[in-house]
Image: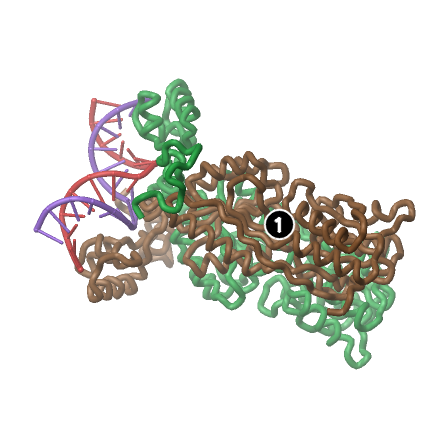
Chain colours: A brown, B green, C red, D purple
Amino acid sequence: MEQASGDDPAEPGRSRPSEGGRRARRVTSIDVARRAGVSASAVSRAFTEGAYISRELKARVMAAARELDYEPNPLARGLITRRSGMVALLMDELSNPFYPEALQAFGSELHRRGKRVMLFAPAPGEPLEDVLPQALRYSVDGIVVASAHVTSALAEAARKAAAPVVLFNRMLEHGGLSAVTCDNHAAAELVARLLAEAGHRRPAFVAGLETASTSIHRERGFAAGLHQAGLGAPRRVSGGYTYQGGYAAALELCRGGETPDAIFVANDIMALGVVDALRRELGLDVPGDVSVVGFDDIPAASWPSYDLTTMRQPLRAMVSETVQLLEDQLESAYPKATTVTLPGRLIRRGSARLPPA
Amino acid sequence: MEQASGDDPAEPGRSRPSEGGRRARRVTSIDVARRAGVSASAVSRAFTEGAYISRELKARVMAAARELDYEPNPLARGLITRRSGMVALLMDELSNPFYPEALQAFGSELHRRGKRVMLFAPAPGEPLEDVLPQALRYSVDGIVVASAHVTSALAEAARKAAAPVVLFNRMLEHGGLSAVTCDNHAAAELVARLLAEAGHRRPAFVAGLETASTSIHRERGFAAGLHQAGLGAPRRVSGGYTYQGGYAAALELCRGGETPDAIFVANDIMALGVVDALRRELGLDVPGDVSVVGFDDIPAASWPSYDLTTMRQPLRAMVSETVQLLEDQLESAYPKATTVTLPGRLIRRGSARLPPA
DNA sequence: CTGAAAGCGCTAACAA
DNA sequence: TTGTTAGCGCTTTCAG
């Protein structure tokens, strides 16, 4: 196996097989060490933030490294430091445009910190708990869970995990897990008050997944706001956080003529379905007959066909808080669960009659 | 900082700090070996497909492994086999819903084959070539490039790469790279013929990115089809593969009253922009005044607000072909570049007047 | 501050 | 078939 293996002896146009093939030997820290006339440890130190190494030695190593185009192998490094430089992302709702956006944001944010995204996108139905051990096998530096299907089983697995876990855009009441969310309650409350103030009297709510904390908190906040305004509890239907679900939910809400005059929808992708059902199927005018308010502010919300009034989530901030939490937990030996809550921002567009700002 | 920081000295329910913390020692192949009364190599062989090991020894190892909840560390394994079990995915257009769908599909397909997705989602403007070496540092088993910004520089980097590279949904004429695409030319040709057959006489084309192979081939195919039908070259505008670009493109095409009677749009997300501009801004009827045909069949294409007639790409098939190509190249020592082309399928909806199927 | 030596967890020759 | 011995590429005590 010393000779370049498995190649034509006289392959044309490829003078040195071991060079042209895919078997090119990688340059290692030892190569760099030799070139710089130092030990391998010196190379290691040069590439380790805050290691004890003199300016000049470091400079010499770096020069050699640059010449050889060397960068440390994160996997080999991870074997010993137990940090691979990868962060696992658990997302199972990629069909909701909010998540691809988040994904992109995580990508940038982690890249900036010299880390990589390992994506776990289990098909619907695959149990999430199974995914955690999978991620752990890769010695990930942290795990971000952005799935509505966070159960206490997952929480338990997460607490035992050898890597910090942070929930993104959801939380678990007593799970003992760190989480980053928007202030769903306050945001929904505001929507309710504004809707009431604008004169709506027959409000309705379209929930997402019944077990999702986001949906629950938005519903509670909405109900609270209505209550403050002297209105009763809204009618409510579930839409499963999908476009089709929202569409069906709107039909359901309007069945039997009890048409609501305002619908607050737990997320935008459902809200688009609601608007389509209202207009296309029921011939209603939005916002003339019914006001619709969504949540998230996905790109499609601003398209002229929808022009959706919605509560924007501070995506970038949520992402960077999440990553920060991960790093904090990685530092501390016995981190405590922290919940970060960021304010939402109402984006006024044309799908709802609201009092002037 | 030696003492467990920031926690109650007498925290209840956590008797042995070193047990409750995140420092739990991982179980290794040696633990399993000891338990099964065998050597570490035996454990390795038990977990290696097709290794020389007796039925009973394997059974014994597996039993011990199960008891200890052991699974081999893919990173350590990768250090020596040079296969990490990870496949890098290069995607920079996550805002086009086609790609999140593809991402999900890659996730499932790779998961089925025991591999993981490492996602590289460079922000717009970040050079793609830089990403390849990044991926290679992680000893990925392959790299899927699904970016419209494939340049010959990238191709060169890819050819030198220590891992197979396959282009997804794009190709490079003379780049020597394997690729999987839909038959863009034939699909576009068909659209042109049908549009002509239905009596359209002022066709237009909205291109995506000018350098993207998909856009180029769709444009050529469209022109060819029109030509066959005795029509001249279509007017054309570029939309940069974004919703906003499509919107602007439609306005541009209709400026000065030369309104086309049919617009073929290089992808769906632009087509939605085209439809919105036509209807909302120009007050035109789709398909009454203008027929619109898209490409991809993203979920939003079927929403009632758009009801977009479009050429569907065989997403799942494209994904599994891509992964297969990767594996093939991984096997062979000197693989040759292969291009797989799959047929598209026309999805007839309400945005275009077409002859009956 | 620097180098030598040991070893992260695993697989791949090599003998037995 | 199985165990023993190296060693993947790197970091980290430990001496100096």
Element assignment for label 1: loop
Can residue A357 be seen at all in this image of the molecule?
Answer: yes
Q: In the rendering, at what x and y percent does residue A65 appear?
A: 28, 61
- Dot 1 alpha-carbon crowd within 10 angstroms: few under 14, some 14 to 19, many 20 or more: many
Q: In the rendering, at what x and y percent does residue B151 appear?
A: 50, 65
Relative to A71, say whether B233 is above or below: below
Q: Which residue is mark 1?
A: A94
Q: Residue at x 42, y 61 (%)?
A: B157
Q: In the rendering, at what x and y percent does residue B73 appear?
A: 39, 38
Q: Amino acid at mark 1?
A: Leu
Can residue A6 be seen at all in this image of the molecule?
Answer: no
- Left or right, A172 with respect to B206, comes to left
Q: Residue at x 67, y 52 (%)?
A: B313
Looking at the image, the residue that sits furthest to the right is A257
Quarter-of-image position of residue B66: top left
Is B153 or A202 nearer to us in this picture? Answer: A202
- Left or right, C12 with respect to B320, comes to left
Question: Badge 1 sits on which subunit?
Answer: A
Looking at the image, the residue that sits furthest to the top is B56
Relative to B254, say whether B19 is above or below: above
Q: In the rendering, at what x and y percent does residue A248 appear?
A: 80, 46
Is A357 or B159 nearer to us in this picture? Answer: A357
Relative to A60, say whether A44 is above or below: above
Looking at the image, the residue that sits furthest to the bottom is B256
Is A346 or B91 nearer to us in this picture? Answer: A346
Quarter-of-image position of residue A163: top left
- Left or right, A337 with respect to A315, comes to left
